[in-house]
Image (spheres, coloured by chain):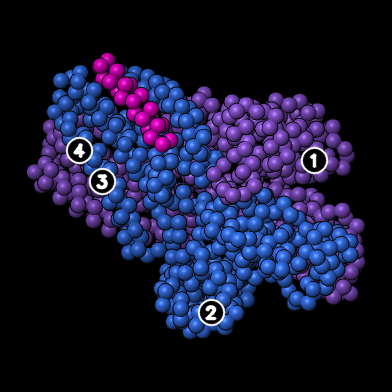
Chain colours: A blue, B purple
């Protein structure tokens, strides 16, 4: 737990806990765990523990805390823990969660179990959860919380303040109240800070902000995140297509979306899953990696097949075998730079139809310039190494070809994949490597065959 | 601008703007730009535009809006625009910014210009900015804002409410007031929502939260982000080493840190800069990419040198040249999976000294299992292809060796690099590729030389 301040109380408790674990003082571990740490701290501790230690710690967590801790764990671990519980146990540990967090957890269970859990809940709670469950997890509807405080536009600030005082506590992250009309249609937001500096006789209508645009319930969660980041929101109202208020989204859930989203590209490019448990078992890890290695083996065999076409040429000029990886790998590097830049640009919404042509031009010319530069360097080195001018000229030409192709494919490929609803980060790097390998070996060995045959 | 809801007003304005731009109706463009879009929308539009269109748009932005827009732009573009202005112009466009945003922008200017801009400011503003400038940009001090509302613990909630009503507006993101004693030392937080549901005769001391830990001013910004995400904070107090309140950090700035931080690993692994302008010119792009291609060329030449050692063996058995890229590339893929997982685990604070040994074991065994699996597949394919049992056995052995080495290096390398303060995402992939190339070619061709010589 090296990521929180060393002199903080949480850090000191964690040090004590780790010492207690080492010395086997389980009672002490349980005490620190259940009264010294927040649920998110416990979740982080579990995620940072290898399986045996993790199982030990999870057994020591109080039953009442389990639901709270579960919501902060990654999906890999959530699924494992949830699958061990029956509907009654699930209902018990999940009962105090907010509706959006509860829906997130439920969505990982089989339909049948979800229905069983919902049956054990009281009518009001069930309706709230079902409202969220009706929307896909990765939309505004899946992110929203149905616990909102709404007010009417025609009452005075004074009345609102008195109404609030009747609550024992306001929902967390309440920076604004939501103003709705009689038909529950969204009208505006009433920031609490604004209320505090207004005359108590003013009406809600006079004080509220009306330039807030409510979030459509079907909006993708990544777009919700963009709106929060761009307009510095703490909470935002969610509405149905016909403008009825359905709930609100708060920044804490959006921060999770932002973190997962950013991780996503990084992990996908290495063929890993976003929710992957860092401390998954040998068996789970092996199985998952095997799939990715298998996919990439196809790429490797394709490259080999291309080389195989030129066996005779290589037998004649062995230097070709020595130099050929340079052409392929430089193409791969150049391509993955472009690919990464475009994937990032798409993720933050900078790249669209309008500016792709410009990008493609830029990449083309930049590919030519870098192609020529490094072709010259490699050609000179190759000539000096093998005392052969021809081989220098051939590798130079192949490098320019491969770098330009890499730049163009790196630009177009992610856009094409996205238009087909394929994750560009996941599929992009494999396809790109196949292209740069094939083009690299083909152009280098093909040219060589022309000139040496 | 495909990342905001299609039916939103902002989206419609952008469509109008783009049409006006295309038809050359600059007056209309200027009108939409300056009265229809928020500063962050304008910044996003600039970042999404190729150079010529960007210059055109920037010229149309009102002088009064420039500072606000600038703070949302990436550093690449910020630096370019700032460098065109003299101290007087800078002071004018920057005067209304919050102290942390202003400090961020100033930090990109030469010392001399910073001093000149500070001189044009009034005493109070200058002191506020200097307070933030005193801390590195990537610490809590660099993130904090010095505009805080503080209250004393012994006054009543009623007095606090009356005090607040004297303000025309509260600072943005004010979810809590900060409670300090007479010596300005931090004591607790007074959430506004809690105040609203308390008796007005209660004292601040009775209502405030004291379990909030203030953030040390020297804490790294990534750790600040972890604290905000873990404890669902909207704002947090920043204190000096001796407990004096210096300012507060708000979630909007933390969201930016989280976004940049996540991008960082992705971009670094491809040798790109986090702040890189997606629409940088051909020349800038070529120069930056050239450096990375040069570094990777060293890796490629190293691999070639290894192959060069075995020229005689390849001349005898050309099939080796056909198959050798498979060994190197499978090692590279396996290694980069481990590397990415470890880099992500380190970034979110899951991996530390205590659990590295377990990880290393897991990777070792998983490497052996996948090595054996794919070695068998590749061996069978190679035997069938070249009708040679020996070459199958050799490539199988080389694959197991390379996959195990890749897994171990992928685990240890990022930890080692981080301990030397080298960015593991940037240097890790190059070094890892060098290792898997060298080990791959060396083991395959070396074994072949033993058995075929």
Q: Given this view, does label 1 or label 4 mark the residue nearer the observer?
A: 1
Q: Are the residues tagged 1 and 2 within 8 Å (C-beta)?
A: no
The Cα–Cα distance between marks 1 and 3, rounded to whole angstroms, is 58 Å
- Using the image, determine if residue A124 lies above or below residue A306: below
Query: In the image, what residue occupies the spot 88% across and 55% down?
Result: B167
The Cα–Cα distance between marks 1 and 4, rounded to whole angstroms, is 64 Å
**Mark 2, other Cα within 10 Å: few <14 / some 14–19 / many ≥20:** some
**Main secondary structure along the magenta-highlighted residues:** helix
- Using the image, determine if residue A392 lies above or below residue B156: above
Q: Would you name the residue on which mark 2 appears?
A: A93
User: Where on the picture, by quarter, is residue B123?
Assistant: top right
Percent position of residue A256, x then y: 56, 59
Q: Chain of mark 2?
A: A
Quadrant location, the N terminus of chain B: top right
Q: Chain of mark 3?
A: A
Q: Would you name the residue on which mark 1 appears?
A: B96
Residue A305's tag is 4
**Mark 1, other Cα within 10 Å: few <14 / some 14–19 / many ≥20:** some
Q: Would you name the residue on which mark 3 appears?
A: A298
Tell me which numbered mark, 2 or 3, is placed earlier along the sequence: 2
């Amino acid at each position: 737990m090296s990521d929180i301040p060393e002199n903080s109380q949480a850090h000191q408790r964690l040090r004590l806990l780790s010492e207690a674990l080492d010395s086997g003082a389980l009672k002490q571990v349980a005490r620190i765990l259940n009264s010294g740490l927040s649920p998110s701290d416990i979740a982080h501790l579990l995620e940072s523990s290898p399986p045996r230690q993790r199982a030990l710690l999870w057994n020591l967590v109080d039953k009442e805390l389990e639901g709270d801790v579960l919501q902060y764990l990654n999906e890999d671990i959530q699924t494992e823990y949830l699958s061990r519980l029956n509907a009654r146990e699930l209902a018990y540990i999940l009962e105090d969660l907010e509706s959006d967090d509860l829906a997130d957890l439920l969505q990982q269970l089989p339909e049948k179990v979800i229905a069983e859990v919902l049956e054990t809940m009281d009518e009001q709670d069930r309706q709230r959860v079902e409202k969220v469950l009706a929307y896909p997890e990765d939309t505004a509807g899946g992110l929203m919380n149905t616990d909102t405080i709404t007010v009417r536009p025609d009452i005075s600030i004074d009345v609102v303040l008195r109404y609030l005082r009747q609550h024992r506590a306001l929902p967390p992250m309440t920076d604004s109240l939501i103003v709705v009309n009689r038909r529950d249609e969204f009208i505006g937001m009433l920031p609490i800070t604004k209320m505090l500096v207004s005359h108590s006789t003013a009406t809600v209508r006079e004080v509220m902000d009306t330039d807030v645009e409510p979030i459509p319930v079907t909006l993708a969660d990544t777009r919700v995140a963009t709106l929060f980041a761009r307009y510095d929101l703490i909470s935002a109202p969610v509405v149905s297509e016909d403008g009825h208020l359905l709930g609100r989204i708060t920044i804490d859930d959006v921060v999770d979306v932002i973190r997962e989203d950013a991780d996503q590209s990084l992990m996908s490019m290495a063929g890993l899953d976003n929710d992957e448990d860092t401390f998954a078992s040998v068996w789970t890890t092996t199985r998952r990696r095997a799939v990715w290695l298998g996919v990439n083996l196809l790429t490797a065999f394709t490259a080999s097949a291309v080389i195989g076409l030129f066996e005779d040429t290589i037998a004649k000029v062995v230097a070709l075998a020595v130099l050929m990886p340079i052409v392929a790998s430089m193409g791969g590097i150049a391509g993955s730079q472009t690919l990464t830049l475009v994937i990032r640009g798409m993720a933050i919404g900078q790249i669209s139809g309008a500016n792709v042509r410009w990008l493609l031009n830029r990449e083309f010319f930049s590919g030519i310039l870098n192609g020529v530069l490094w072709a010259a360097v490699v050609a000179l080195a190759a000539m000096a190494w093998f005392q052969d001018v021809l081989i220098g000229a051939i590798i130079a030409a192949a490098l320019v070809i491969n770098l330009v192709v890499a730049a163009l494919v790196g630009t177009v490929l992610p856009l094409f994949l996205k238009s087909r609803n394929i994750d560009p980060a996941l599929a992009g790097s494999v396809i790109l490597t196949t292209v740069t390998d094939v083009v690299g070996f083909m152009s280098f060995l093909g040219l060589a065959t022309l000139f040496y045959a």
